[in-house]
Image (cartoon, rainbow, N blue to C red):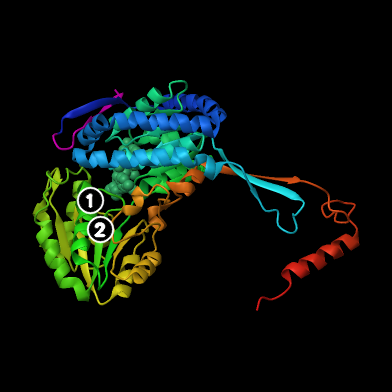
Amino acid sequence: MTTLTFDSLNPATGTVVGSHQKQDAEAVREAVGRAQEASAWWEELGHAGRRRRLLDYKAVVTRELRELAALVHEETGKPVADATLEIVLAITHIDWAARNARKVLGPRRVSGGMIGANMAASVEYLPLGVVGVIGPWNYPVFTPMGSIAYALAAGNAVVFKPSEFTPGVGVRLAELFAEAVPEHPVFQTVTGLGETGAFLARDPRVKKIAFTGSTATAKRVMAACAENLTPMVAECGGKDAFIVDADADVEAAVDACLWGALSNAGQTCVGVERVYVVDAVYEPFMRKLSERAATVKAGEHYGPITMPGQLDIIKRHIDDATKSGRTITGGPDSVRPPYVDPVILEDVPEDSPAVREETFGPTITVRRTKDAQEALELANDTTYGLAGTVFSGNKRRAMALARALRTGMASVNSVISFAGVASLPFGGTGDSGFGRIHGADGLREFARAKSISRQRFAVPGMRLTSFSRQPDELERLIKVVTFLHGRRKR
Ligand code: NDP
């Protein structure tokens, strides 16, 4: 007999938080059908109507902040304060998307250029229809909302498949939307295991998939999308580096490094996993890092590992690293399910799993480099390319290093700070995926550009796109183009 429901568990206690349906192909088909009908109404509302409703949704989520944070805490195990922080960030993104959609996506005139001087040219960004969002469990509000809010603001209906570890949060997000927008099911949640997400990706009426999760699953989702040429945004995690330059504020760098590595038990796609410290500040940095790490406790400052299977990966990385590297803080015994205490590993070979694979736990590897250039080269020696951090007292060098990191995002003298700036696009390169959520790029990601050129008047003697074109008209064109483009710049 097939089970029709599944439970979400509190990872700290193992108690059941809620029971949810494993929605099958038929249920997903029906949800997409409803979304398709709702999308026509939502599109018809226009930017002003959607803006008002999205701001209402923001207000409903804000008023529900404490209850939602409690639910996030129950399903992920993270401290309520951290759950609150992620919801606050999500609220700022709903606000930004609602307020900026018209400006970014609405019609605007563009120049016709010299050849098209008789054309009135305009571009606007129109909704795609139904967008499918497949979300993770690590930030079950903030991460999917980076796609959901922007897709809705761009005029699409959304069907959301949350992770099987945080279905209750996903269901609640759609319920709150229905409080603000009761007319039509513009935002629905479907629950289930991986196959429910696969049904969504395979539905030809879904016009874009926004996926967050592992690189391996992204490839499977992309293969499903390929059947219908459905485009996709893929946000697939990383192996982010943290560079400490010679004249960095060491105290501030240590504080940021620990937060970036250990908060949310290291289960952060843009979390710090590799640290490269230049020789000049290595000793003071390591001394302060180990002192401060000793004061951070699993179960107090951060929660358990949400996904039980991840504990094996974290353990494998630590066990392997301790064979050839040194442990500064913690070690193999730090893994005491469902918690993992802070682990700091030094001089782990660059080709070991702890340096190359995403650990997704409260562990970091630290390496001494002779200078910032060597740190940069090691930071870029990865198949991932999500984000990175630079701490430096020299603004120009810090910006140059941040630019040279082969990542989609970087923060300078702060950690993960780009995620809270709603106008900055969020996403990666390489194994970290492609496409962008957040900011103007995040709005355009969920829209199709529509270009219109309107002839304002016919240019006499220039019937270039007509079978009645005469040779002298082509000659005139060659003269114009030679005048405009034929000279070399000095
Ligand atoms: P997955 O990539 O397995 O899952 C992400 C989402 O995809 C979930 O909603 C999942 O549903 C769904 N899914 C799974 N299989 C399919 C499929 N065939 N078709 C469509 N959707 C599918 O990530 P996990 O949650 O299992 O985490 C595994 C690893 O991913 C972690 O170790 C970490 O490295 C990385 N990760 C990265 C995140 C990031 O922020 N970039 C976030 C979370 C994880 P279900 O949960 O029901 O399986």
Q: Secondary structure at mark 1?
A: helix
Q: Secondary structure at mark 2?
A: strand
**Earlier sequence position, callout 2 versus callout 1:** 1
Q: Residue placed at 44% from the left, 40% from the top?
A: 97
Q: Are marks 2 and 1 in contact (CB under 8 Å)?
A: yes
Q: Which residue is mark 2?
A: 273
Q: Nearer the viewer, residue 84 or 193?
A: 84
Provide residue 63's location: percent of width, then percent of height.
30, 29
Tag 1: residue type? Gly
The verdict on label 1 being within 8 Å of ligand 1 is no
Q: Nearer the viewer, residue 86 or 134?
A: 86
Residue range highlighted in magenta: 1-13
Q: Nearer the viewer, residue 215 or 90?
A: 90
Q: Which residue is mark 1?
A: 266
Provide residue 274's location: percent of width, then percent of height.
25, 62
Judge from the rendering whether residue 267 lies leftward or rightward of residue 15; answer left or right: right
- 357 is higher (above) or lower (below) than 143: below
- 432 is higher (above) or lower (below) than 180: below
Q: Residue placed at 12% from the left, 67% from the top?
A: 287
Quarter of the rendered image showing ligand 1: top left
The answer to if 296 sits in the magenta stretch is no
Camera sees residue 164: yes
In which quarter of the view is residue 410 placed?
Answer: bottom left
Question: For the residue carrying disc 2, how many other residues have a C-alpha within 10 Å: few (<14), some (14-19), or many (20+)?
Answer: many
Q: Quadrant of the N terminus?
A: top left
